[in-house]
Image: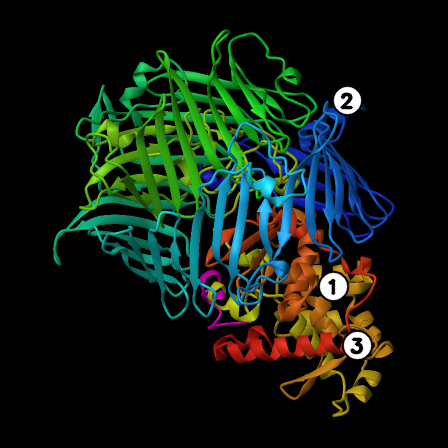
Amino acid sequence: MSRTTIYNGTPTISVIDNRGLSIRTLEYNRNMGGDPVDEYITWNAHTLLGTLDCSMDPRLFSQLQNNSNIPPNMKYLTSLTGDVVHATSGDAGKKVQFFDIEGRLIWYKDANCTQTTMEYDLHGRLTIIWEKKKGTDSPICRDRLLYGENELKAKANNLCGQLVKHYDTAGLSQTNAFSLGGRPLNQSRQLLKNIDQSSNWNTDSESMWCDLLERETYDTNWEYDAQGNRITQIDAKGNLETVTYNIVGQPKVFSLTLKGQPTQDIVKRTEYNAAGQIQKTEYDNGIVTEYTYEESTQRLIRKNFFRERSVREREVLQDNHYEYDPVGNIISISDKVDSVHFFRNQIIKPKRQYTYDALYQLTFSTGRESDAHRQYQSSRLFLSPSSLDNSRYANYSERYKYDRAGNLIQISHHGVNHYTTNMLIDTTSNRGIWQRGEELPDISASFDRAGNQKNLHPGIPLEWNTSNQLSRVNMVVRNKAENDWEGYLYDNSGMRIVKQCIRKRQDIMQTDTTVYLPGLELRTRQIGDTVTESLQVVTAGQVRVLHWENNTEPEGIPNNQYRYSIQDHLGSNSFELDIQGKIISKEEYYPYGGTAVWTARTKVEADYKTVRYSGKELDATGLYYYGQRYYMPWLGRWLNADPAGTIDGLNLYRMVRNNPVNLVDPDGNAPTSKDFRVNHGDLLYGLGPSRVPYVVQLFPEFKRDAYANPIIIDQYNDEIIRQVQKKNVYHRDERIYARNILVPNDLEHHVIGGERGSFHLWENYFKVGENNVKFHVPSIYKEISGKYKEADYHYYQKVQGKWQPALIWKRGSKLGLEIAAVAGETGPHIHFVLDGLNIESVVSKSGEYGKSITASELRYVYRNKERLAGRLNFYKNMEKVGSPWETSPDLWRQYTPTHRLKQRPNLEQQRKNQLTSTTSRVNKVPKEFAWMLQ
C-alpha cells in the first residue's frame, strides 16, 4: 500500500462565521492507510467586537464534551482598541499588560508576579525599564536606554535619534557610529562584574553605572557596500572577515584574516542556479559541495561533497540522495558512497527512512546507530565518539506517538538497546514530565506558574530569571559545599552572551567561561586561580577557527586549527574537516536530535565540537541552546513554554510541529520550511528592488508566465484596476475621472472570467471585501471620489498613461495580509523581505521608507501578528530571520498605531514622499521585474 494513501480524505476545513471569523478548524488524521480518520477540532470563540476571546485545541475540546469545566488553552481579555490586556494560558500562565494612550506598553505582570514598568521620553522613546520581583520591597532598574543627539560628534557619526547606549541585563551595549542607512559601524560591549547578580541601574549617575562593569571592552566594526550588504567585520580580537558578492547580491567568496596572519579564502567560490539556490561551493581545503534540485519543485534531491585531488581525480566523501512524498516530506535519505556494513548478523545500509501520519507528524523512522550505544541501558544523553577507523554499526527503528494536542508522548526505540520513553501530560495543559517506571510524577509541582520546568532530571534543579530565561542548572547538589552548576547571562534581546560552568575537581574549583560576541567566542578555563586555557573560536560562515592564546592549546590539536563544517539539510553539522580536507569527526542524528553515530579522529578533537544538531550549541547539561529557549533532544520537546506565545500554535512545548525531518526552528519560537507554497497562494512582501533576488529564488518560473502563479498582491490589485478601467472612459483630468468612475456590479464575474481568473486567492479576495468595508473595492473607489485629495492616498496617479487609484495600492496591499489572517492555517503564508528597510523609520513612521506602503504593511503585520501566527516568514540577506519585533522588542514597544496619533502627518508631504518612493523604486528595478511595481 502506498504511503500517501493515508492522506486520502483528510482535508483541513475552516468554519467561518458571518463576520468572516474562524470559529472551527477541522483536521483529519490517520497513521496507516486503512485506518479510519480521526477528527481533530480546534475551537475559537470571539467577542461581540470580533476580537479573539478563547481557543481550545482538539485534545481539550474532546474533553470538554464530557466535562464542562475544562478550561481553554488560551483566554483573552481585550481593550476597546483591540489590545490584549489579560491573557491566560494553560501552558504559560497568566499575563496582564497595560498600554498608554499612544498604544505603548507601559506595565505588565507575568505569571510569576514579576512586574515590569516602562518609561518613555517626550519623543515616545523607551528610556527606562523597571522590574519588581515578587516578594521584594522595591523595583530595580533593569534597563536604561540613552540616545545619541547629545553625544560628541553626533552628526558626524549619524547618532542623532539613534539608540547609542543600552545598559541592560548583561552590562553595556554601545554603538559609536552608524552608516547613512542606519546600520551600526562600531559597537562595543562591556559585561557586568558579577554575572550572578541582576543588573540594577537605579542611580542617576552614569559614572556609578560604570562601576558595575568590567573594564575590558569588546569592540566590533563593520563596513557595508552601497546596497547595505555587510562586506567586512572586525571582531573584538582583531580578526577580519570579508564577504564578496556577485552581481545579484549573493555571497560568493568568504575570506578570513586572523590577526597578524595572512588572509585565507575559506570559501573560494559559490555558484547559484536560476532559482537563487546554492549549486556549488568550493572551499580552500580542496572540498567541493554540490547540490542538485528537482526541476519542477526545486526540492533538494542530491547533495554530495568530495575532496578534489586533481583536475581529473576526486574522492567522494558523501553522496546523499533524497526522496519525497507528494507534499514534500522527506521519506528517505541514502548515502550512495558509504558501503553496506555487516555486523551481528545484520545488513546495515547507509539509509534512513521516515513515515508520517496525515498531519505530517513523524511516526516511524529507521536508520543506523553506533554499536557504542550497547554500553547504555536506556535512552542516552551523551555518546562518546568512536574511532573513524573502527566504526561498528547496527540497525535501529523508532516509533513515535502523539496525543491530540501534538504532544510527543512516547518514543519506542529498537536497536542496540530496546527502551521506551513515556511522557505524562497534564490533563488541562501541555505541560509534561518524563515518566520513569510505574510511579506517576506530580506535573503541577514540576513547573512554576509561567510554565518553566523546575528540574532537568531528579536531583538536578533549574533556576529561572525574572524574564523566564534559564539562569542556572545545578548539575551536582551538595549539602555542605558549593554545587557544580552551569549559569547563563543574557542581553537585552534575550540572546545568551555569557555561559559559565563551575565544577569541583577534588578540592579545586574549575571554572569554564564562554563569552559570545559577533563572529567570536572567547572560552577560558581556570583551575583555582590559574588560567590553563584561553581560546578564541572565530566563526565565519560554516568555518570555525580554534586559536589559543598564551600557548594554552591542548596536546593533539595544532593551534589555529580550521574546522570546516558540512551540514545536512537541517543545518546539523554532519562532518568536520581540517585545512587539508581530512575528516576530523562525523556525526549522524536521530530525527529528534539525539546522536546516533559519532566517530572522530581523536577524542581531544571531538571534545571541541560544540555546534551540532540543527547548527545549535550542545551544553554540558545535554540541552541544545536555540536562542530563545532550550531543547531536550531525548524527549523531543522544549524546556519551557514558547516566549513568543501561540506563534506556532496552541501547544507551547511542541517541537517543529512534530516534523523534525523537514522543519527547523531557527531561534526556539517557531519552525520554518524552505518551501514557498505557490499553489497555496503564498505572497511575497517587501520593497520592490529588495524583492527581486527573492523572486528569482522562490519563483523561478516568473519570466515564462508572470500570470500563472502570482506571488505578490499587486498582481491581484492590478487586475482589479484593469477591469475597472475597461468599463470606464478615460479623461485626462483626474478630478473628472475620479468623479465619474463606476465600478461594475459584476466585477467579480469579469475578474474570475478573465485571463487572470485562475489566481488562487480571488475567492478570498472578494470575500474579505464583503466582510470588511476597508477592503471592499466599490467602497474604496467611492471613498476616493467623496474625499478626493482630502485624506491619505485619496487621489489618482498616472501610470503608463492611465489613472490608477493610490488607495487601492494602500488598502489592497494589506488585503493580502488580511486574507492570510482570515483564512487561517489553510490560507497563504506571508514571506516578508526586510532588506532595504530601516526598522526604526518603520516604527516611527519617519523618512522615505518609514512612510512607504511597505512600511505600512509591516506595521499591519505587527498589529495582526497573533492572527497571522504560524504563517509569517521573514528574510534578510537571502536568509530567513526572526521577526523585527523579536530581534528588537524594545524598539517595537515604541510603535504607536495611527488611530492613536494625536496629529496626522501632512497629507501633501506624505503624497510627495510616496510618489518619490514609487518613482525611485521603478527606476531601480530591471525591466523584466517591472511588472512587480506596475
> Number of marks in the image?
3
Could you tell me which residue is drawn at 35 percent across and 11 percent down? 506
Q: The N terminus lies in which quarter of the figure?
A: top left
Q: Which residue is mark 2?
A: 66
Q: How is the image coloured?
A: rainbow
Q: Pinpoint residue 266: horizontal percent, then vertical percent.
A: 27, 53
Q: Which residue occupies the foreground of this view, 431 or 534?
A: 534
Q: Main secondary structure of the magenta part?
A: loop
Q: Which mark is residue 766?
A: 1
Q: CA distance from mark 1 to mark 3?
A: 14 Å
Residue type (three-letter) at the residue carrying disc 2: Asn
Residue 340, picture quadrant: top left
Residue 611 visible from this viewpoint: no
Q: Which numbered disc, 1 or 3, marks the residue that appears first in the sequence? A: 3
Q: Pinpoint residue 680: horizontal percent, then vertical percent.
A: 58, 55
Residue 704 highlighted magenta (yes or no): yes
Q: Is residue 676 above or below residue 46?
A: below
Q: Which numbered disc, 2 or 1, marks the residue that appears first in the sequence? A: 2
Q: CA distance from mark 3 to mark 2?
A: 52 Å
Residue 391, picture quadrant: top left
Q: What residue span does the magenta drawing correspond to?
A: 695-706
Q: Which residue occupies the foreground of this view, 662 or 679?
A: 662
Q: Pinpoint residue 624: horizontal percent, then vertical percent.
A: 45, 32
Decide if residue 900 is on the left or right side of residue 346.
right
Q: Give the class, few, some or many, for how many residues have Cα within 10 Å of label 1's Cα (few <14, many ≥20).
A: some
